[in-house]
Image: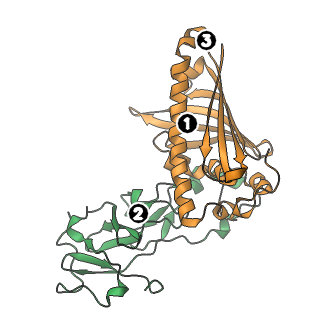
Chain colours: A green, B orange
Amino acid sequence: MVDASIRATNPGNTPPEPPDAFYPQPIEVSGLRPGAVNVRDLGEGVHVVVVPGQDRLHVFRDICPHMGGPLGEAAVCKDATLECPWHGYRFRLETGHLVDNPNERIMAELRRRAPDCFKPDKAPRYALTPMAYQVVGGRAYVQRRRSEA
Amino acid sequence: MKYHFTVEYEIDCPVAIAVAVYLDAEHYIFLHKKYSDTYEVLSYEPETCKIFIRESWELLGLRIGQTCMTEYVPPAEFLNYDIEPYPRWLPSVHHVMKTRTRVVYTEIPERNSTWSTLEIDLDLPFWLWPFRRWIERAITRLKVEKDEQDIDMIRRRAALFGRENNSIYLADHQFILHKDHYLKHFGPNSKPLAPLA
């Protein structure tokens, strides 16, 4: 269980202000499994994956930016990446950036001889967006993105 | 001795989505990793939509699996045949039993949904004939389990992006098998561009 390693970013026990800048259900930090994918419901139908790191939490929406895969079923790899269970795309926990699409190797022969309508150079820069949070009294309050507030 | 059986059910999505999921080979060894964790292309004939593949997995430190010819018959038919064990010396039912499968997706127009039909043709030696029902159950169970994983993916994507949304499969950057043929038959919002047979 995670406890002392995740330090309070906001001393005291008062929930962060303003309340509507944060999702209604905080995450109990002590209940998180370290180094593993934890799925949490923040209320309002928003689910996130939480991977506790050395001294911080990595919090992302439970949706792979590639095809919408359930990152709650993702694997945490040894190189501190999160592997999507649908297509194996791997994202760096620290930054959320896509670091590997293994299919580029697995499907190399097919991709090389694919028809002109396949344009891999047009691939977007897929990335998970890390969600900001504040820890108060052992609870992590996840901040809405500015556009959601 | 020939034995034929069929596995049929509805998949609640437009035919364009069901076909795209089948052609989306990049999910085979991730979503379906329980069955096979390695997919290798041994040969590819773009003109005939034939790909000779090897699927394998590790058992007791040994990599075993099967090779198989796969063929796409646009717009919504898929064939598998010439199935052989890998490595060739591996004791396997495929040495004595020839298997040919045909999956066809047909439209259910009143629900814009898909009827999935899997036809299996087995050529069995006489001594395997008493086990034909057992083989049928095993193949059916495998088919249903893998399709359930695909259906979960289809349902989740429908909830997130819309039931008819096939834009990711049409996107320039997205790799799917035989993409040029798919684009000839299916357009945006899963609209068939020609009548589905």
**Residue B9 appears at what percent x and percent y?**
60, 39
Q: Nearer the viewer, residue B115 or B77?
A: B115
Q: Earlier in the sequence, mark 3 or mark 1?
A: 3
Amino acid marked by disc 2 = Thr
Discs 1 and 2 share one subunit: no
Q: Secondary structure at mark 1?
A: helix
**Residue at which label 3 appears:** B125
The mark found on residue A81 in the picture is: 2
Q: Nearer the viewer, residue B162 or B41?
A: B162
Q: CA distance from mark 1 to mark 2?
A: 32 Å
Q: Chain of mark 1?
A: B
SS of the residue under disc 3: loop
Helix, strand or loop at label 2? It is strand
Q: Which mark is residue A93?
A: none
Work out whether B67 lies above or below A107: above
Q: Label for residue B143?
A: 1
Residue shown at 59% from the left, 42% from the top: B40
Identify residue type, mark 3.
Answer: Pro
Q: Chain of mark 2?
A: A
Q: Quadrant of residue B2?
A: top right
Residue A135 falls in which quadrant of the image?
bottom left
Between tags 3 and 1, which lies in front?
1
Q: Residue furthest top?
A: B126
Look at the image and tell me whether residue B123 can be seen. yes
Instruction: Give the residue type at disc 1.
Output: Lys
